[in-house]
Image (tube, coloured by chain):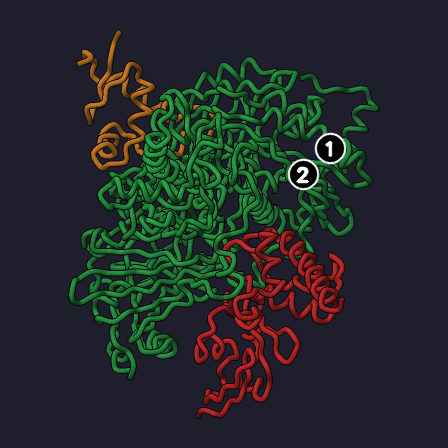
Amino acid sequence: MAYFKCPVCRKITSTHFDLARHYLGQTDKKHKEWLKTQDLSYARLITMQVTEFGNKGYDALAKVLKKEAPEVEMP
Amino acid sequence: MSEYSIIGKPTPNVDGPAKVTGEGQYTFDMTLPNMLYGKLLRSPYPHAKIISIDTSEAERLPGVKAIITGKDTPGGKWGLWRRFRELADQQALAMDKVRFIGDPLAAVAATTEEIAEEALDLIEVEYEQLPAVFNPLEAIKDDAPMVHDDFPNNINATRHIEWGDVDKGFKEADYVREDRYVLEAAHPCAMEVHNTLASYDKGTGRLTVWTSTGSPYFVQVNLAEALKIREGDVRVIKPHVGGHYGGKNSTMPDAVNAAILSMKTGRPVKIVFNRDEEFTTTEHRTGQHMALKIGLKKDGTIVAFEVKTITNGGAYTGLGATTLYLTGTFITMPYKIPNYRYDGVRAYTNIVWGTSIRGFGAVPGKFCRETQLDRAARDLGIDPLEIRRRNAVEPGYEAPGQYKFESCGIMPCIDKMQERIKTKWPKVGKDEGIGYSAFAYMSGGIFNWIHTPYAFSSAHIKVNIDGTVDLYSQAADVGQGHNTVAAMICAEELGIGIEDIRLHLGDTAHAYTDLGAWGSRETLMNGNAIKDAAAQVKDVLISIARLKLGENIAYDLVAKNKRIYLELRPERGFSYYDIVKDAIKANDGVPLTGTGHYTPHNKGMISPAYGMGIMATKAKVDRETGHVEVQDVLIVHDCGQVINPLGARGQVEGSVHMGLGYGLCEEMPMDQGMLLNPSFVDYKILRQRDMPPIETLEVPTYEPNGPFGAKEAAEATIAPAAPSMANAVFQACGAEFFSNVLKPEKVLNAVKEAEKKAKRTRKSTRKGTRKAK
Amino acid sequence: MKRELNIVVNGESHNLFVEPRTLLVQVIRGELGLTGTKQACDSSSCAACSVILDGKVVKSCSVLALQANGKEVLTVEGLADGVELHPIQQAYIDNWAFQCGFCTSGQIMATKALLDENPKPTRQEIRDALDGHICRCTGLNMIQEAVQDAAQRIQAQKSGKGA
């Protein structure tokens, strides 16, 4: 089974969607800053997630994490 | 269960004589020798930089003993969400900017209240007004003014909850509908305003604070952080409290500034809010926007449910972030929801902040869900009570990763409701309707955002040579009757009378921690701690009695009716009072003591137990005036083992009063952040003439996690009041509501819409067209 | 400039000097230290401060102290007979007609005034008499029941004395 690590902290999850869920639950500066490097904004992702039915915010972030989150071994 | 001597029996309030004679002391009544009076200077602007504050003229006013601004305070920030430091955003006085009309920026201590008020007028402040934002939908936009640095788009807190596969569930549903709501803010309106008396001891450097609070522990830890002193050097005492309803959880500027002024002057300082300050600067029930999408099968069973909300958080966090979480969980209870998704955002705005008012997030959610469910039932042709029965949970139901119902009486409640309605309201008249709402609520929270290292509740008892018992705990009676419940639980466990117990509750110097009166936690959590403490003493008494009896070790002894005796041979036993004497002698003269504590473990994310039930409201709508007459209310309620039927009834009826007010007349209209109705003249509360009769039937269950099987009875019944009333109007005439205050003009519009819709439906039916499902 | 105030409160005479703008409630709670009477609003709209002035229930926040000069005031502290509670007080306790208790003194004094004038009020008359009293805790119906109970107790007491 593949695992993916958060680009900013040590969190590891088994799906990109779960990683996106973890990510948008973090409110510290580092996590928010990394999103800017990907041309994303924390606030815009949250707004997408909360103003429309569905998981629009998580899906958008998960798409980016598919490329940027390194695959790792479960420690 | 009639096996109890005290539990379950109607028991008068142990504070009764104090409260009916006027002898009971509230913080409001207290004075100390050499006391000064404090007042707060408050911002007239919703958002402004503080350029300068000149207190020189005010300082010269005879009678003024101290004036402080932000720079004179220790500068510590505090908040109830201590686990996330950035959310500890409150401070004694604004430092660089003010964030809502009423945000305090200076404090005065003077020899009289009048002088303190006069001094406020002499303080010169130069502000630079900043753009402000009041609507959470505006606040989260990119160009909105920032209320706090480091919170882009004013996103204070978010919450996501998901289980199952919601999108698949909607595909499988036969019927899907979406509804959007706007929920108004409301104020708790405690009769005793926020007020604090602080006294700093110059000799020891310790602070004693009397304050109108629901949690002495919260005040203690917040003061320690605000003042940058040790928790152990702060003692908080809660006298009688004149109402709370969740509006006195956050430690407020009255407490902190009274403390700072006392530390500065070396004299006791008392700060009392006036009613205007109470309305405009203390916590209220959060206003919010909600969107609900529900998917059901043809038979009315829910297959998918999705909820999105943006809440108007106001200028600080308080317990508002917890409310955001609970909004997303209570809205699912007590129904089986196989697939669920919730997203909530709490936005900072430039108004006073919204928080944990009675119902803690259950109230707006249930209004939305229950009115939506009635519309779905109508469209599916299912009876509204029946659709609730089909979705009601059963004991053992688990919402994956969130909560589990152990005791769970919703089905018998619905059955009993159905039975009773037949005789109570056999028919309805013209423009009358019966509306339902199911409900459920926690018995104290499992989450620990206050980040306490202590057990969630503790109690300590000491039994004296004459058999009298001193019971110590920090638990708070704020009017809900916890003092009486505490005495009852202790007495029942020890087999003695309430008259044998002397209470020492609500003081941080006594005993150990209790997190306070919020989330309906005291009966279950503090009750468990008290029972635990009493059981330890009972064990000692039983051991002594067993030794004296010399009976076979297999025989059990019980403590009841002031005796310790063989359960099977009651005539063989001893007086409790005699055994106490023996036990103390055997203990080298040391009084018997027990220390109990309780912290829930492995009980999910929310609570160890849930009160629940179903409420029905009969109402009549006047199609000419839009007036809604609430004629009658029936509640069938499962609160586990009822500890005190009198107290439980009082809590239920008080909840209904507040809940009906939320549905009929309570609102907080604001203009550019200024509250337009900050007095009892303009903020409407239901009065004697407005209240309908309320019949409450209890369906007792046994909650394994609660003392003697008890669980909460204080908050569950507030949430169903407004939706059951709105549903009654819906049933009467088809009027639909997408916001909670059913004022006459709104009702008239909704009735007209319903009449138009009915006309259109009749026309299209006559034409032979039908909407395919 | 302070003026002389002569007032009888709970049967005791007091001779005080007060500013003309001093409210009766301030004298009761302040100078006389009788804090059983509460204040909960600044707009004379909650009736928590109700006392009986020369036999009539008044909001003591709406009466200047000097207006009570030469008059008799009864506050909640004056109801009990030594250690024996007044039947109204006992009825409030037995019917759980208060929770936080902050509005209770006002409710009790209004109840006393009502029952003095109308010993057997109907439920509606009770509602009308107490409608001006804000209570946030009880839901109000239990207060009405306490008043009905108090009325019966007072009648029973009277006929007991008569017999």
Q: Colour of chain B?
A: green
- Judging by the rendered image, the residue that carries numbered circle 1 is B421
Q: Which amino acid, by three-letter code, is at mark 2?
A: Leu
Figure check: B688 above or below B395: below
Which mark identifies residue B634? Answer: 2
A46 to B510, vertically: above or below? above
- Residue B91 x, y percent position in the rendering: 28, 55
Residue B93 in sight here: no
* Whether residue B192 can be seen here: yes
In the picture, the quarter occupied by the N terminus of chain B is: top right
Residue plotted at (59% across, 42% down) = B739
Closest to the observer: B675 or C105?
Answer: C105
* Sequence-first tag of 2 and 1: 1
Query: In the rendered view, would you say B566 is above or below B747?
Result: above
Of residues B84 and B176, the one nearer the viewer is: B84
Q: Identify the chain drawn in orange.
A: A
Q: The chain drawn red is chain what? A: C
- Tell me whether circle 2 and circle 1 mark residues in contact (CB < 8 Å): yes
